[in-house]
Structure formats: structure tokens, C-alpha cells
Image (spheres, coloured by chain):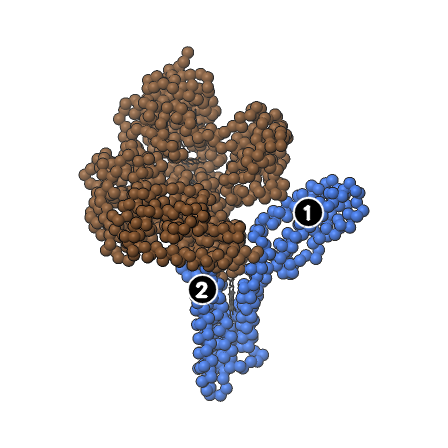
Chain colours: A blue, B brown
């Protein structure tokens, strides 16, 4: 029933992109340039125009994505974006005629390859992480887990009210100094080295041995509550981590594609200027 | 000394107020009794600042009391002023508890004690009924209450909530924000509540936020204490407040005790009334919501008319002009002549009183068709019913050959199949001759069927024949089906009822005419679900063909109706019709193959179970997300918000998941939408493509939101102006693209209305959630496709 964007429309755009690449290679092989292959031959101009048009069209995807209620599907667009984006590797490389150097032209080419490489990672992320997120959450929604954590905190405070200050203050640490997410790095790591709950858990465990016997039952309850909370925290941090992995590459892909756009403009202008 | 009145009016809702004002204006000796200490209790109890609607807009108001759409407070003020201005004789805190006697000499008992005499009685007590009381010693404690307007009014209290229905649960959950809550449940579980409420209360009990007593009932109350009867003996609960949500006693019992007859036993039946609102008791009149007119303006018009009628003044009904306009298509006949013609020509409509027919015709349309005009097409999702007043129509019974038609003549009706099954039209119908047709929308038709037994019988008889013809034997001469039709019966099942039991030796065939069924077999001590069968299909043919005991169990997934076809009669038909026999056998073999396939996937049953619990058994179109493809970008929600005034009707993350198959909180577009059943403004409809949507007549009563078992309707205020993209970017104004734009606080006097998914019926590209999903994770599926979902879903790994 469900059909992913890679297999969309019976691989329609994969076929189109392959055709484009094969034709480009064939013409390149057949063509005998006046001196050496480069962007200045009629074939070079042809491939260059196709490549530039493709890049503009790929950038358009960012705008298309924010147009809602359309007659065509975004899924089709993404499928085309991915396959035609990949075909740029062939089209643009052939356009260069393998002439690289320390100049604006090669900069544009490198930026393009970086954008494409990040796109590759995106495909990998989209294929792998969604399933992991589902398995990690086991059908529970984020709101439910957050509520549960809040509830556990409430219970901990209740139990702690009858316990010595040293333990009660650790419970407050667990309640007030636990963070999920935060900086990009923290999100991506999926752990928190300075987690309030972990500190509280360790501290209470250490104090437990020296506590009065009458507090034994309450302390055990506290340990099991905080233990439960840690499990939830692990789930949520993993969730945040996976979500971040699903998004992070776009923060590279998009700015890079703007840089590419600028470099491309420079490349085209300079070519015409020196002509 | 008992006082003596010409007219006593019981109940001061809009109907009673309007009647009393007219009586006062005419100088009649009257009294208006009101149970509570204020006028018009139903409107008094609306939410503060609620915007009250003046629907139906086209209907003129005919009353001495003023009324126009506006805020609750203003309307109540206007009416209180009206009571003064007209010197209405109103008595508060007077509940009428019995009425006896006959025209000219009624005796009314007030508050069970005093009595008054009346020549005429007008009943305008509405349908809200009496809130049920606890009925235990000590219940007079001032902190026992039967309603809760705003849970945030209370803080730091221990509150006991009695009553484990939706209202009780919603109150209990709302109160936990600031209070300790104890819940008292008479049963041993929470039965018959909405899934969302069930989840919420179970989670709250699990986490000990709410303490719950099961199988417990209140024994007595002392200030600060509730004593319970539990299976383990008495238990005491200390508390600061008791909120008992025990539902309301509908007023029917009281009304019947006064001698008034209802049209049938059906829960939604109405009192029998004459064209002048007179009940089966001469001299006793019924108006307003109790008479079946659920809107304020109608109630007020009737209050006015009924007093005029009693006084013998000629009345021009407020709807006369509307009917004249409606009947304009038929030239040269007066309104009464048209009504007369309809009743004599169409047996289906002949059993209504004139009053009912007027109301019925106000909701219906009159059409004129020329020969060959299309009336509706096969696969339309409309569900109105047509009656032929004059002329004839052709039904195309064979989709492959439009020339094969059955002709219906004046007096017949058609279109009832869509109404009964909640599914698409099964045939295209064209006008055969110049025809005059009455088209009646679903709601008016259902009202007719539930209030007039004769009409129900007429419909059922015709429907059986047509449904058998359409779904079982489409290419057979209808005359050959006589025996099968005459021995067929209609059977109803509730969700979960067994229709056929594995191992049984019966062999009748069941045609599912509404709802859906699930087929399962016991294998290795486990019920393995083999298939899911939607309405319009038959089950049970295997036993009939093979003469063997039933090989599987068939259960109703939702409330369903079947036509039970006698095996003997059906067999004789098959003997005579070898082509039909071959078709049925071929279908039978397909099913056998399918069964073998599903049996090899032992978890397929769990998937069916899951989907049925999520309402797929009654869905016509449901949003399913494959979480293995969903990148959690929420573009679906953004698309929904962007195309629906800034408010998403879809919550992607909420909702259950099986394996990687996720059912987000979004409308299922049910075959028989629960939300539609109780909309006073009649503003929920089904569009030709099946979308269930709410139009702008919504008055914001919230019935639909409460009625939807899947919690997909939300009451919301209109969002603020959306800023331009640049304003948002550079000036930080308002919410950005796709962001939720609902105001957090209620703007004064704002009109809260119901919002839900309309499947983007006005957008040519179809549901925008689906078209905006970049990966193809979000799809919408129809019942015909459920089976392929089941066989393709990855097993429940998570
Ligand atoms: C939440 C909500 C919102 C609504 N919004 C709208 C809207 O916007 N526009 C609209 O047109 N309609 C609306 N309606 C419908 C409208 O309120 C009713 O149709 C209307 O109130 C019916 O009027 P009535 O006079 O028949 O009965 P009611 O208004 O119900 O009045 C009955 C009165 O009789 C009294 N009574 C009952 N029994 C006795 C007795 N035995 N002795 C003495 N007195 C008795 C009651 O206390 C009450 O005051 C809404 C309904 C609800 C529930
Ligand atoms: C030079 C070539 C490319 C350019 C200029 C480009 C540009 C863009 C832009 C502007 C977006 C919109 C992001 C947003 O607004 O959210 C985007 C999204 C995306 N691109 Fe590319 N892209 C290129 C090549 C590729 C390639 C080769 C791939 C895959 C291999 C790819 C995969 C994606 C994916 C998966 C998305 C995200 C879609 C979504 O979740 O909405 N891109 N790209
Ligand atoms: S809103 Fe109506 S049609 Fe939609 S799921 Fe709820 S009851 Fe069914
Ligand atoms: S809130 Fe729902 S039930 Fe009430 S009038 Fe509006 S649409 Fe109808």
C-alpha cells in the first residue's frame, strides 16, 4: 500500500535520470573537441546549461515544499529531486571536461558535490531512522512520556518529603536539573553527561547504605521511581537524537546549496566576461 | 383555594417565553411556570459569552419577544426585559410534577404540593430533562453538585467524582490540575466511553493521579465525607466536594405520564402532534425542542402560533412564505394543494401529519427534471432520498450497459440504498419523462424513519428487494427474485455480536447492508482473523454451497444490519440461473484462496483487530501513516493548517501505532457518522465524494465533538488574520507558515465552532496532508483497500 519516494511511480525519475546520464556519456565519448574537452565547446555549453538549469530547478524544491494544497504530490517532486540531483554528478563532471584548478569554477563544482553528498546522507537518514524512532518509542507519544516523567517527579517529591534532607535535595536535583535535548551537540549525542537524574540516582544509592532502617522502604521506592525515570529519559534522548539526525543534514544541505547558487552565478558571469 | 388560568405554560425556554408573552399581550389570564430560579435554563447554562446563533437565517421571527444572534448574556437580558415589558406572569422555582384532567379542566401539581387549574396547557419543557441525583441520605450538603462549568474554579480540594461516563471522566481529568481527585465507578471497568477518555483515565489511575473505586456506589453523605458501598463492605472517603455526573432523565417519562402519546418506542421518537401542535390530549399543546424543533427561533415562533391558535385567531405559519418559494417550481398550485398532492401521490410520505410534512418539505427540495436529465450517478457519495411526485425515472441496473434500465413511476422513491449503507450510489438514475421529484436530505429522512413506523416498513420492504438485486444478482430479472426477497429478513447486530458461529449447521446467507464484518477461525486455540468484509458484500455462502457446517465465525465489527437470505430459496434460484451460480462459486473459490494466504500470516488477525478498534470498520476513508517512511517533518500538519485557516485538523503524532502502521488523530469519514446524529443546526454533511464536513451554520454546541468516538472534532475560535510572508519574516508579526494560529484566549464574543477534517474537498489535488508528504508515508485508504493493508503491513515488531 505505502510506497516510498525512492520507488515512486515505478522508478520514473530514476529512469529519466539514467537516460540523461547515459546520453551525456555517449555524446561525450562520441564528440571530438577542437583541442581538449572543456566547458567552452558546444557540448560543454550544452552540458553546462543543462546543469545550471537543473541546479535552479533543484533549489526551487525548497519553495515548492511550502506550497500547500497542490494538485501534484510532494512525494513525486522529492523523487525527481533525488534522482535528477544525482544525475548532476555525471552532467556537471562531464561539463568540466576534468579541468580542475584553484579557481571559482572548481569551487562551484565542489560546493555542488558537497550538496549532493549531504543529499546522500539525507537519503540514508530517511531510510534508516524513521523505523528506529518507532521501535524506540514503542507506540507511546512524546507527550505521554513527558507527562509520565512529570508524574514520576511528583511521586518522588512526595516520597522524599519523609526522608532526610540529603536525600530530599538529591531528589530536587533530579527534578530540576534534568534536561532533554538542548544544544545541537547534546541532541545529537543522545546522552547527557551531567544528567541530574543520573547524579541523583548515584547519590541516593551511595547514601542508601548509611540510611536509617526505618527509611529503607521509602528509599527503595525512590530508587525504583528514579530508575523508571531514567528509562524514560533514555527513550526520549534517543528520540531527540534520531529526530536531530533526520534534520541536521538539511542545515548543511540548504545553506550549501545557497552558497552553490552564489558560486554558480559567479562562474557563469566570469565565463561570459572573459569571453 | 386553587387558582384558575386560561393558559398555563410549563417551562420558560424560548418557546414558553414567547407563548407567555403572546398570552400577556392578548390579555389572557395565564401563568408561566419555571422549575429553576431564572428564565430559560437551557440557554442560561450555555458557556459564558457563548455566541448564540439565529439559525435558520431564512426563517422570519414571529414573536413578541426579541431575538437575534448574539452573545448569551445579551439574549438573556433582552428576554428578562421582555418579561417586564409585557408583564408576563412568571413563577420561578415551580416545577410542574403532574398534569391531569382534560380540555377546559386541567389540574397541574406544582413541586408535588400545590395545584392550579387550567383550561389549556402548553408544554415547553425542552429536552434537557432532569439531571439525575444521587438519591442517598445527606445529599443536600451544599457541596454536592451535578454540574461542573470550569474545573479551574477549584483549587487544593479533594474532589470526589461519581459517574464513570464521558462527562465524569472529563471533569475528573480537568480537576486533577489543581486538586486531589477520587473517582467512583459503579462498574468494574470503564465501559462505553470514548477511547480518548478511556486512555486518559486509565493513565491517570495507573500513575495514581486519580484514585478509583470500582464496583462502588454511594451509600450516604455527611458534610466532608462520602460513605461508599463496595464489594468489601463500607468505605469512607473524606472530601471537600462531590461532583455527581449521573446523566439526565429524559423528559419522556413525565410527558407520557401526562397522557401524551409518542409516535413509537424509538428513543428518538417525538410526541404525536396535530397541525396546530395539539397533542393526543385535547387542549394540551407541545412546542419547542420537545416537539422536535431544536432551534431557538423555531421554538419562539411556535410559542406565538400556539397561543393564537388556542384563542381562535387565524395563524399564518411563519414558514408559509418559505414553502411558497420552495414550491415555486410547480406553477398554479397553492402550498396546501402541493402538500396534498405529495401526500396522495407518494405512499412513503402519506403517514406524516401536516405539521411534520411542512417541516419535512422545508428541509427537502423540489426538482423538475426533463427526460434524460441525470439525477445522480453511480459512485456519487450523496445520501438524499428522492420521491417521485409526478413522472418517472430510469435506473441503470447494469453499469456496463446503460441501456438496461428499470423504470420507476409516480409514487415510488429511490436513493435509499446510499442512505442505509452510508456508501456510494450503486446506480446511475436518469429522468424518463418530465418529472417532479422531492429530494430529502439524510437527516430529515432518518427523522421520518424513526418517528413513523409505517414509513420505515415501506422503506425496508423496497430496500430488501433492491439490495438483493444490486449486490447479489445484478443481472437477473427482478421477477425471478420474488421468492428470495419474500423470505428475506433484516437483522441488526451490535459491535462484536456473532452473526455466524464456526461449527454451526445453519446455512443461510447474509448480505451486509450496513456496517462491516470480520471473519475468523479458531486455529491452535487462537482466533485467527481471515478477512474483513465491508457493507455491500455477502457472507455465509460457503456453508450453503458445500452443505458443510460453518467453517468460520463471522462477527460484526460495528453496529451493522444484514439481510438474511433463506438458503433453500437461494439454492432454488441458483439451480435456475447457472450463470449466477458460476459467479457465486468463483467468488467462493477466491475467498478460499485468500483465507489460506491469511492463515499463513498468523499476525494478520492482530492487524485487523487493531484497525477495527481504530474505527476502520466504519470508515470510508482513513489517514494511515507508515512510520518506516515518515521522517517526522510534520509537513502534513502544516499543509492542513495552511489550507484550513491556520488550524490543523490533524495531529500526526497522537494516535495508536501497530508495528509501523500509525493511525493519526484524523477523521475517518464514518459510513454513519456519529457526529451527524445530534447536530441541531444540521450543519454536518457528506459531500458527493464522501467527505464528512461541517458548514458555516455551526452554532458551536459541541454535540459533534462529544459524539465522535475518535476525538477528531475540535471546538475552536476563528484564527486571527494571517500576516503576509514578508511581515512575518521581517516584523515577526503573527504566526508563520504552517504554525498553529488559534488564539490561546477566547476573544470576547467570539463564536466557537466545530472544526474537523474535510478531506480538502474544495482543493482539486485532494487531501493536502497526503500531497504534502515528501516521502509517501501518509496515504488515505478506503474500505475496499483495507485488505491489502492487512497483507502488506509489516508485523508488529515494535
Ligand atoms: C450547548 C447548546 C448550544 C445551543 N446553541 C444554540 C444556538 O446557538 N442557536 C439556536 O437556535 N439553538 C441552540 N441550541 C438549541 C436551543 O437551546 C434549544 O433548541 C432551545 O433552548 C429549545 O427551547 P425550548 O423552549 O423548547 O426548551 P428549553 O430552552 O430547554 O427550555 C425548557 C425550560 O423548561 C424548564 N422546565 C423543564 N421541566 C420543567 C417542569 N417540569 N416544570 C417547570 N419547568 C420545567 C427548564 O428549566 C427550562 O428552563 C443549543 C443547545 C445547546 C444544548
Ligand atoms: C546541487 C544539487 C542540489 C540542490 C541545489 C539541492 C537543494 C535542495 C533544497 C533547496 C532543498 C529544500 C530543503 C528545505 O527547504 O527544507 C532540498 C531538500 C532535499 N534534498 Fe536536495 N539538493 C540537491 C541535490 C540533492 C541530492 C543529490 C539529493 C539526494 C541524493 C538530495 C536530497 C534532498 C532531500 C532528501 C531533501 C529533503 C526533502 C524534505 O524532507 O523535504 N538533494 N534540496
Ligand atoms: S468526525 Fe464524524 S465522521 Fe469523522 S470520525 Fe468522528 S464520527 Fe466519524
Ligand atoms: S457544534 Fe457540531 S453538533 Fe453543534 S451545531 Fe456545530 S456542527 Fe452541529
The 10 Å Cα crowd at callout 2, few under 14, some 14 to 19, many 20 or more, is many
The residue wearing badge 2 is A76
Residue A111, how many percent across, how many down?
55, 72
Q: Residue furthest bottom?
A: A35
The answer to whether residue B201 is left or right of residue A26 is: right
| Residue A75 rendering spot, x and y as whole percentages | 46, 62
In the displayed structure, would residue B653 be above or below residue B25? below
* Residue B28 picture quarter: top left
- The residue at the far left in this view is B332
Q: Is residue B64 left or right of residue A260?
A: left
Residue at 42% in and 21% down: B98
Q: Nearer the viewer, residue B351 or B189?
A: B189
Q: Position of residue B136 (x, y in %)?
A: 55, 25
The residue that disc 1 covers is A225
Percent coordinates x, y for residue A127 in the rendering: 54, 64
Quick check: B419 left or right of B168? Answer: left
Q: What residue do we see at 40% from left, 24% from top?
A: B257
- Residue B400 sits above or below residue B540 on the image: below
Q: Taking B62 as reference, is B421 above or below it?
A: below
Q: Is residue B609 visible?
A: yes
Q: Residue at x 64, y 52 (%)?
A: A232
Per the image, label 1 sits on a secondary structure element best described as helix
Along the line of sight, the residue nearer the viewer: B619 or B38 = B619
Chain letter for mark 1, please: A
Amino acid at each position: 500500500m505505502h510506497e516510498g519516494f525512492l520507488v515512486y511511480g515505478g522508478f520514473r525519475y530514476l529512469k529519466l535520470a539514467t537516460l540523461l546520464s547515459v546520453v551525456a556519456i555517449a555524446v561525450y565519448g562520441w564528440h571530438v573537441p577542437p583541442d581538449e574537452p572543456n566547458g567552452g565547446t558546444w557540448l560543454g555549453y550544452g552540458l553546462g546549461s543543462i546543469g545550471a538549469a537543473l541546479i535552479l530547478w533543484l533549489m526551487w524544491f525548497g519553495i515548492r515544499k511550502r506550497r500547500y494544497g497542490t494538485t501534484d504530490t510532494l512525494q513525486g517532486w522529492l523523487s525527481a529531486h533525488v534522482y535528477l540531483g544525482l544525475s548532476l554528478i555525471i552532467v556537471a563532471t562531464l561539463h568540466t571536461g576534468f579541468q580542475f584548478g584553484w579557481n571559482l569554477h572548481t569551487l562551484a563544482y565542489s560546493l555542488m558535490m558537497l550538496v549532493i553528498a549531504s543529499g546522500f546522507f539525507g537519503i540514508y537518514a530517511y531510510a534508516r531512522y524513521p523505523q528506529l524512532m518507532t521501535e524506540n518509542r514503542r507506540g507511546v507519544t512524546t507527550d505521554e512520556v513527558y507527562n509520565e516523567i512529570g508524574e514520576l517527579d511528583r511521586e518522588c517529591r512526595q516520597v522524599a518529603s519523609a526522608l532526610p534532607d540529603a536525600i530530599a535535595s538529591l531528589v530536587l536535583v533530579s527534578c530540576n536539573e534534568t534536561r532533554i535535548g538542548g544544544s545541537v551537540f547534546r541532541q545529537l549525542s543522545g546522552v547527557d553527561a551531567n544528567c541530574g537524574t543520573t547524579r541523583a540516582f548515584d547519590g541516593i544509592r551511595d547514601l542508601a547504605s548509611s540510611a536509617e532502617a526505618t527509611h529503607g522502604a521509602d528509599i527503595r521506592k525512590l530508587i525504583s521511581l528514579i530508575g523508571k525515570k531514567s528509562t524514560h529519559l533514555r527513550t526520549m534522548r534517543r528520540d531527540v537524537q534520531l529526530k536531530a539526525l533526520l534534520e541536521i543534514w538539511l542545515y548543511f544541505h540548504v545553506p550549501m546549496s545557497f552558497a552553490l547558487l552564489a558560486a554558480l552565478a559567479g562562474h557563469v558571469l566570469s565565463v561570459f566576461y572573459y569571453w | 383555594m386553587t387558582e384558575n388560568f386560561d393558559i398555563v405554560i410549563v417551562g420558560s425556554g424560548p418557546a414558553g417565553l414567547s407563548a407567555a408573552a403572546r398570552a400577556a399581550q392578548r390579555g389572557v389570564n395565564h401563568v408561566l411556570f419555571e422549575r429553576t430560579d431564572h428564565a430559560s435554563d437551557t440557554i442560561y447554562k450555555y458557556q459564558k459569552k457563548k455566541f448564540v446563533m439565529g439559525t435558520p437565517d431564512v426563517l422570519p421571527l414571529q414573536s413578541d419577544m426579541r431575538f437575534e444572534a448574539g452573545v448569551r448574556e445579551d439574549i438573556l437580558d433582552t428576554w428578562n426585559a421582555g418579561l417586564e415589558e409585557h408583564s408576563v406572569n412568571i413563577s420561578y422555582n415551580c416545577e410542574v410534577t403532574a398534569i391531569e384532567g382534560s380540555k377546559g379542566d386541567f389540574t397541574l401539581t406544582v413541586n408535588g404540593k400545590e395545584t392550579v387549574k387550567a383550561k389549556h396547557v402548553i408544554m415547553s419543557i425542552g429536552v434537557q430533562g432532569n439531571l439525575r441525583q444521587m438519591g442517598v441520605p445527606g445529599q443536600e450538603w451544599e457541596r454536592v453538585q451535578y454540574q461542573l462549568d470550569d474545573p479551574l474554579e477549584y483549587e487544593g480540594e479533594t474532589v470526589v467524582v461519581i459517574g464513570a461516563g464521558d462527562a465524569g471522566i472529563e471533569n475528573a481529568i480537568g480537576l486533577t490540575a489543581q486538586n486531589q481527585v477520587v473517582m467512583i465507578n459503579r462498574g468494574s471497568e470503564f465501559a462505553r466511553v470514548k477511547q480518548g477518555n478511556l486512555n486518559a483515565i486509565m493513565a491517570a489511575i495507573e500513575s495514581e493521579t486519580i484514585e478509583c473505586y470500582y464496583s462502588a456506589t454511594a451509600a450516604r453523605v455527611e458534610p466532608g465525607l462520602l460513605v461508599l458501598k463496595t464489594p468489601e463492605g463500607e468505605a469512607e472517603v473524606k472530601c471537600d466536594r462531590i461532583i455527581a455526573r449521573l446523566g439526565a432523565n429524559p423528559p419522556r417519562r413525565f410527558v407520557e405520564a401526562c397522557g401524551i402519546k409518542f409516535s413509537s418506542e424509538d428513543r428518538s421518537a417525538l410526541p404525536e402532534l396535530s397541525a396546530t401542535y395539539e397533542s393526543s390530549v385535547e387542549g394540551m399543546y407541545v412546542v419547542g425542542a420537545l416537539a422536535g424543533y431544536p432551534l431557538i427561533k423555531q421554538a419562539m415562533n411556535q410559542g406565538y402560533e400556539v397561543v393564537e391558535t388556542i384563542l381562535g385567531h387565524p395563524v399564518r405559519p411563519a414558514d408559509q412564505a418559505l414553502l411558497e418559494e420552495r414550491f415555486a417550481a410547480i406553477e398554479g398550485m397553492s402550498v396546501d394543494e402541493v402538500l396534498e398532492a405529495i401526500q396522495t401521490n407518494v405512499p412513503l410520505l402519506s403517514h406524516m401529519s401536516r405539521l411534520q410534512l411542512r417541516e419535512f418539505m422545508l428541509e427537502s427540495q423540489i426538482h423538475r427534471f426533463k427526460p434524460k436529465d441525470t439525477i445522480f450517478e453511480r459512485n456519487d457519495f450523496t445520501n438524499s432520498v428522492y420521491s417521485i411526485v409526478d413522472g418517472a425515472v430510469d435506473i441503470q441496473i447494469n453499469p456496463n450497459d446503460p441501456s438496461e434500465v428499470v423504470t420507476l413511476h409516480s409514487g415510488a422513491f429511490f436513493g435509499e440504498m446510499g442512505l442505509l449503507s452510508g456508501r456510494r450510489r450503486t446506480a446511475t438514475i436518469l429522468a424518463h419523462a418530465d418529472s417532479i421529484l422531492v429530494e430529502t436530505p439524510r437527516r430529515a429522512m432518518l427523522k421520518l424513519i424513526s418517528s413513523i413506523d409505517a414509513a420505515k416498513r415501506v422503506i425496508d420492504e423496497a430496500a430488501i428487494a433492491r439490495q438483493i438485486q444490486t449486490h447479489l444478482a445484478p443481472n437477473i430479472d427482478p421477477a425471478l427474485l420474488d421468492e428470495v426477497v419474500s423470505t428475506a429478513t433484516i437483522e441488526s447486530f451490535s459491535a462484536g455480536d456473532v452473526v455466524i458461529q464456526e461449527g454451526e449447521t445453519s446455512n443461510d446467507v447474509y448480505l451486509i447492508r450496513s456496517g462491516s464484518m470480520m471473519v475468523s477461525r479458531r486455529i491452535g486455540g487462537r482466533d485467527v482473523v481471515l478477512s474483513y468484509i465491508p457493507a455491500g458484500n455477502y457472507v455465509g455462502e460457503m456453508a450453503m454451497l458445500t452443505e458443510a457446517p460453518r467453517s468460520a465465525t463471522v462477527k460484526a465489527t460495528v453496529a451493522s444490519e444484514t439481510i438474511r437470505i433463506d438458503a433453500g430459496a437461494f439454492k432454488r434460484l441458483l439451480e435456475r440461473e447457472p450463470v449466477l451460480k458460476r459467479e457465486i462459486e468463483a467468488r467462493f473459490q477466491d475467498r478460499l484462496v485468500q483465507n489460506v494466504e491469511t492463515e499463513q500470516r498468523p499476525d494478520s488477525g492482530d492487524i485487523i483487530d487493531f484497525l477495527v478498534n481504530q474505527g476502520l470498520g466504519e470508515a470510508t476513508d482513513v489517514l494511515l501513516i507508515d512510520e518506516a517512511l515518515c521522517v517526522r517533518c510534520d509537513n502534513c500538519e502544516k499543509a492542513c493548517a495552511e489550507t484550513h485557516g491556520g488550524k490543523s485538523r490533524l495531529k500526526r503524532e497522537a494516535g495508536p501505532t501497530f508495528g509501523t502502521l500509525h493511525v493519526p488523530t484524523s477523521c475517518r469519514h464514518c459510513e454513519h457518522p456519529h457526529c451527524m446524529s445530534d447536530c441541531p443546526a444540521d450543519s454536518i454533511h457528506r459531500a458527493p465524494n464522501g467527505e464528512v464536513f461541517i458548514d458555516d451554520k455551526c452554532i458551536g454546541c459541541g454535540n459533534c465533538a462529544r459524539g465522535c468516538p475518535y476525538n477528531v472534532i475540535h471546538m475552536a475560535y476563528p484564527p486571527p488574520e494571517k500576516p503576509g510572508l514578508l511581515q512575518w519574516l521581517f516584523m515577526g508579526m503573527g504566526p508563520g507558515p504552517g504554525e498553529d494560529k488559534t488564539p490561546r484566549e477566547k476573544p470576547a464574543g467570539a463564536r466557537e465552532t466545530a472544526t474537523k477534517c474535510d478531506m480538502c474537498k474544495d482543493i482539486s489535488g485532494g487531501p493536502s496532508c497526503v500531497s504534502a508528504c515528501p516521502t509517501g508515508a501518509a496515504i488515505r485508504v478506503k474500505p475496499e483497500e483495507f485488505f491489502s493493508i492487512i497483507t502488506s503491513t509489516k508485523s508488529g515488531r515494535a
